[in-house]
Image: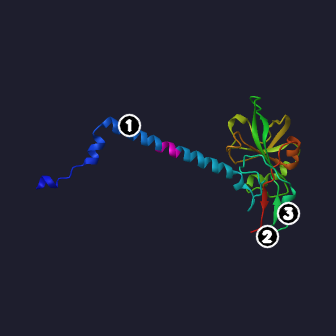
Amino acid sequence: MVGWLRRTPLAWLNLTHSRRKLLTSLAGVAFAVLLMFLFTGFQNALYDSQLQVINQLNADIVLTSKLKYSMFIPESFARRRLYQATAFAGVVAAYPLYIGDAAEWRNVETRETRPVRILAFNVEDPAFLLPDIQSQADRLRLPNTVLVDLKSRPELGARETGVVTELADREVRVVGNFELGTDFAAGNGNLIMSDQNFLRFLPIAVLRKTNAHLGR
């Protein structure tokens, strides 16, 4: 009677009948799970990079072109849309933001050039939340001046205050630094400059006016 009551672990015996097949199956499942986590990480990195700059804008609502579905897509819209936005009740102000992705920065040490992203704004507007940008905005009033992201890739070379190099084949002087970090659009780094300097360095660049600050 006792023998009939004994439980036979059929499931475990099926698994361990062939140790080689068991280990192969476990390795296959583990690899599939690893790939799932890997692709989830890539997806989250892509989404986070889309928001990295937007999260540092002094804005409650960001206006973009209706053709623009990604922060990386160079689609512009008319400046008058910002003026129209200010006509709505509750809108405190609207600030244009200019973005250029094709400017070549020259490493003063190696003389090699790498593309960087430029973010430009009217220095009279509190367009950014980063304290380092707002506190140094007055320095950008001078011609051919920029703030350089300290979290840019080391391939850009020296980026300390006082460095003189070339940007888009024009001489440029570093007048300060800030910390933002790279993303999928700014693979090498970021620069901040005034809207007037932006037009000097990138006169035919696509202008993306994306920052509208609405009152709470």
Q: Secondary structure at mark 2?
A: loop
Which one is nearer the viewer's eye here, 151 or 52? Answer: 52
Callout count: 3
* Structural distance between the alpha carbons of marks 1 and 2: 63 Å
Percent of width and height locating residue 76: 81, 50
Point out the frontmost of discs 3 and 2.
3
* Structural distance between the alpha carbons of marks 3 and 1: 64 Å
- Numbered mark located on residue 90 in the image: 2
Amino acid type at circle 1 is Thr
Point out the frontmost of discs 1 and 2.
1
Above or below, 161 relative to 64: above
Q: Secondary structure at mark 1?
A: helix
Q: Secondary structure at mark 3?
A: helix
List the residue tagged with mark 3. 84
List the residue tagged with mark 1. 24
Percent of width and height locating residue 194: 84, 49
- Numbered mark located on residue 103 in the image: none
Which one is nearer the viewer's eye here, 179 or 195? Answer: 195
Dominant secondary-structure state across the stretch colored magenta: helix
Circle 3/circle 2 CB separation < 8 Å:
no
- When asked about the image quadrant of residue 160, the answer is top right
Label 2: few (<14), some (14–19) or many (≥20) C-alpha neighbours in 10 Å: few
**Magenta stretch containing residue 169, yes or no?**
no
- What residue is drawn where x is 14% and y is 54%? 4
Amino acid type at circle 3 is Gln
Amino acid type at circle 2 is Gly
Read off the magenta span.
33-37
